[in-house]
Amino acid sequence: MLHGRWRTTGSALLRMLLVWAVSTLTMLLLAGVLPDFRLQSDDGDSLTQIALTAAWGAGAFGVLSALVWPVLVRALLLVPALVLGLLVFFLNGTLLLVALRLIPDGRGEAAPETAVVVAAVMSAVASATSTALAVRDDEAYRRRLYRLADRRRRRGPSGGPGAGDSTPGVLFLQLDGVGYEQLRQAAGGGLMPTVADWLDRSHRVTSWRTDWSSQTGASQLGLLHGSTFDVPAFRWYEKDSGEIMVCNRPTSAAELQRRAALRVGHAGLLTGDGASRGNLFSGGADQLALVLSIAARRGKGNRSRAGYFTYFSDPANAVRTALSFVAEVGREIGQGLRARWCGDGRPRVSRSGLYPFIRAFATVVERDVVVAAVIGDMLAGRAAVYADLVAYDEVAHHSGPVGRDTDRVLARLDRSLALIARVAEHAPRDYRIVLLSDHGQSPGETFLGRYGLTLKDLVRAGCGLPVSRRAGRTHSGAEARAAVRAALHRPVEEEPETVRGREEKGSDPVVLASGNLGLISFPDVPGRATLEQIERAHPALLATLANHPGIGFLLVDGEVLGPDGASARLAEPGEAEKLLSVFGPGAADAVRRTDSFPHVADIMVNSAYDPGTGEVHAFEEQIGSHGGLGGEQGHPFLMWPTVLEPPPAALVGAEQVHKVFRSWLRPTPMAPSAGASGLRPEDHRPEGCDGGILPSLQALPQDEKR
């Protein structure tokens, strides 16, 4: 054992010396290239003296980074996360200037702006060298993980209530927006080798069907809190309060979470040593990071950004992520230009403005921070962890569900899964990894792109109201935008929160969009408007909408309206099923359930759907969309280890999936049943139917309760 410890210590010392040597050479090279950076006295020095000066400076910079950096980041915890990412460069430069001051006889000197560049390059090179050495030395990598896990176990209560518990923990990893068919094709085509390996050895996969509102707000509320009741869309108008509820607005998310808890009688799936990472809702967990429902809190109660500290506390992590962020911005700009100049006939939406930065945040920053938090949760031995990775969903909205752009994102997500699985092998308790999605994505040209007007324009025309000559674009409601706003301490979505108090506009309809689902409300009509009230006030509106080629059907006061005067009462068995048959099995039941919601809109509008191509027409600026009925958007996947009891053959709604999750969290392990054996992804189809840098293990997150 003593020999093994000496060998471990010697190996670690050798790696440290190699990193120090590379850092020294990097500093020498930069001193020769940059005019405002020197490593010698005014009288000149020999090459040996210059090399010793560089070694001294590199060593001092490394020690300062290890000792001072975590203290600086903790002091800046209240600084917005994205601002902290930019401060990384300047803080690193300051540490380098201090390190140069420590060199004897004043041989080290650099201009402040040069120090920023030198520090960034040295951190990146040192990190790359350390990572390369760890990757080549697998045994050293494994021993390090064992030491980290053992250190947390010895901490006792601070290491997590579940540390050392023999009961397996459950890790729920949500790949936001990845549909069942998309996962099956990515695994089968070699794009996601980790997922394919799990399916071959240890996991099974099936599809499940969402409610009519096929979007993260409804699905994740159901998955984490067991209720999707009264969530008719991504955004909707509530007449009793005069407010517009938006699922990715922190205040709305907090209210939805409160309502769900009252309805089901419990705080959520993750109560009792659970962790929620990167989600809209907490799930009842006491360990929270990047959770939107608490992002509007002020003071100590807001831990939504705690995950940023644990990740950025390592300067190498911060620099690598910042560089990857810049690279991703450049990649998106290049891909956008290529799509514009080399059109392949597929629909396109605008990818300019802030979108490259939002995409980079979702695919690099948020992914790295969430993965790092999950790693910390496993090494702390938490009983249940639920984490959402939004990268694919954000890119698919603007690039389409299938293509080169989304393929690269899926490949990078697979690498994240591989890292998490490798760390799980060294956690203080066994972990069962459940992979799932909250919805899929359906392709198609936008409603505006196909027909030259927005849904709001069409509604105003049907009501006889003035329509702008220039069609405006509908704001996209992707989840990553809310995460960026929360990181910037600007959690409120940029759109009106209330419709009350509008002068002389009380009769104007409120038109909102949720993917290919539209909602129309009349604020001046108390309660839910009846069919007769709407026809009396706006005789041409319903016919204008129902007969438009881009609209599939309407729901008005318990009645489904289709083109050419077709109608069906939901209360009459079989009528709605026949009218909605093109949208697949269960469509009528989904519409019937939404019709019972207290805050259902006066008119619910679902876009047209082509079953041959799987295309829909989003009322937002998205060519990969979800939110209504039609195509793959309503068929997410659920992938579970075979040691768990398999779910029912037909899972309908997130509430049913929540019940399955709760059964998997029971203390007594469940044996697999015969129905779980031999199932491959291609055997179970739905009814009807070089990337960013992964987080460094040098900065595994600590318990945010410290």
Image (spheres, rainbow, N blue to C red):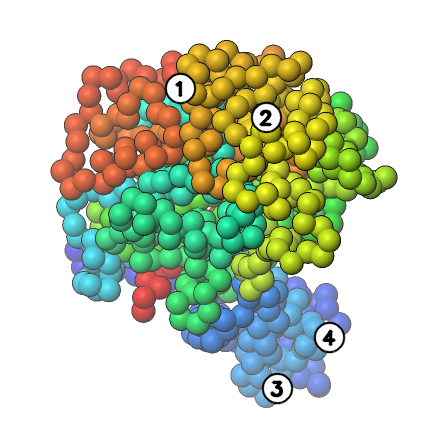
Callout 2 crowding tier (Cα within 10 Å): few <14, some 14–19, many ≥20: many
Placement of 415 over or under 551, stated as above or below = below
Pointers 3 and 2 in contact (C-beta within 8 Å): no
Q: Name the residue under label 2.
A: 554
Residue 234 x/y as whole percent: 53, 41
Quick one: 254 or 543, which is closer to the camera? 543
Tell me the residue at 67%/49% (across/down).
506
Quadrant where the C terminus sits is bottom left
Mark 1 or mark 3, earlier in chain? 3
Placement of 181 over or under 44, stated as above or below = above
In the picture, the disc for residue 106 is 3
Three-letter residue code for mark 4: Asp
Q: In this view, does 315 lie to the left or right of 623?
A: left
Front: mark 4 or 2: 2
Three-letter residue code for mark 3: Gly
Three-letter residue code for mark 2: Leu
Q: Mark 4 points at which residue?
A: 36
Quick one: 524 or 155, which is closer to the camera? 524
Give the secondary structure at mark 1. Answer: helix
Give the secondary structure at mark 4. Answer: loop
In the picture, the disc for residue 681 is 1
Quadrant where the N terminus sits is bottom left
Residue 415 x/y as whole percent: 46, 39
